[in-house]
Image (cartoon, rainbow, N blue to C red):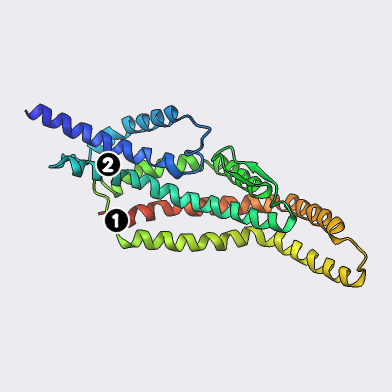
Amino acid sequence: MGEDFLINEAIFLFALIFSRYLGIFFLTPIFSSQVIFYQAKILIALSLTAITMPVVLSFYQPIYPASDLLVLVKIMSELSVGLFMGMAVFLVFAAVQLGGQIIDMGMGFRIANVVDPFSGINSPVIGQFKNILLTLIFLAVDGHLYLVKHLHQSFRIIPPGQVNFSLKIWQYFFRRSGDMFLLAVKVAIPIAGAIFFIDLILAFLARSVPQMNLFVVGLPIKIMAGLLLLFVLIPVLNNFYAEIIFDIINEIPQIFRLISP
C-alpha cells in the first residue's frame, strides 16, 4: 500500500512538471511554431521533465490530492505557468508585427499578404519582415534558452501544484496589453512618420499641379522611401529589438512571483 502511494505521488509530480513545460509550446514564439512537429514538442517536454524531476525532488515532496478533480485542477494550473510566460513574450512579438502593419498601411503594402511560416496566418509584407527579424535576433541572443532556464528555475519560486492566481497577474497582462500598442507605435514611428511627411509634400503638389496623377507617382515614391529607410535603420532596429527581448526575459521571474503562493 505504501509503495503504491509513493508511485502515485511520483507520477503526480511528473505530470505537474510535464504540464508546466508543455505550456510553453502553446503561445511562446519559436516553441509554438507549426514548423515543429507535435511529437517533437512532447519529446522535448518529456526530456526537460526527466531532467528537472530529480532536482525538484531534492527540495519538494509531492502530496497527492484527495480527489481526482483536484488533480486535474492542479495540472491545468501548472499548464498556465508556461502559458503566462509565453503570453508575455508573445505580446512583444505581436507589438513588433503590429508596428510593421502600420508601416504597411503607409507604404501601400497592406493589400499584399504573405503566409507566416510560424503561425500559418496571413500578414502584411513589412509586418512579416519585422517579425522574422525579431525571431532571428531572439534566437541569436539565446532567448529561447533563457526561457527554458527561467521555467526550470520557476520550480523554486512556485512549487509544483501551488500556483496562486492573484489579481496582480491579471493587472500585469492588462498593462502589458496596453504597452503593446505603445511599443508598436515606437517601432513604426520612424518610417511611418517619414511616409506621412511625403504624403504632405504630395498633397501640396496636388494643389499646385492638379493634372499630376498622384496615385501613379506617389505610391512608388513612398515604397522606395520606406524600403530605403528600413534598410538604413536595420542596425538601429537590431539593438532596439535585442533590448526589448532582454527586457521581457528579465521580467519572467517577476511574472512567476505574481502567481507564487
- x, y (%) of residue 8? 17, 32
Cα separation, mark 1 vs mark 2, equals: 14 Å
Q: Which residue is mark 2?
A: 75
Q: Which residue is mark 1?
A: 165
Residue toward you, 212 or 70: 212
Pointer 2 local density, CA inside 10 Å: few below 14, some 14–19, many at least 20: many
Label 1 vs 2, first from the N-terminus: 2
In the rendered view of the protein, which quadrant contains the C terminus? bottom left
Which element is circle 2 on?
A: helix
Residue toward you, 166 or 71: 71
Q: Is residue 77 visible to the viewer in this orientation of the structure? A: yes
- Would residue 11 appear left or right of 114 to someone viewing this image? left
Which residue type carries mark 1? Phe
Residue drawn at x 25%, y 46% as measured from the top left: 159
- x, y (%) of residue 17? 30, 38
Which element is circle 1 on?
A: loop
In the rendered view of the protein, which quadrant contains the N terminus? top left
- x, y (%) of residue 135? 57, 43
Residue drawn at x 87%, y 68% as measured from the top left: 206
Q: Is residue 160 visible to the viewer in this orientation of the structure? A: no
- Would residue 106 appear left or right of 132 to someone viewing this image? right
Tell me: residue 184, above or below residue 11.
below
Residue toward you, 188 or 3: 188
Pointer 1 local density, CA inside 10 Å: few below 14, some 14–19, many at least 20: some
Q: Residue furthest left?
A: 1
Residue drawn at x 48%, y 53% as measured from the top left: 248
Which residue type carries mark 2? Ile
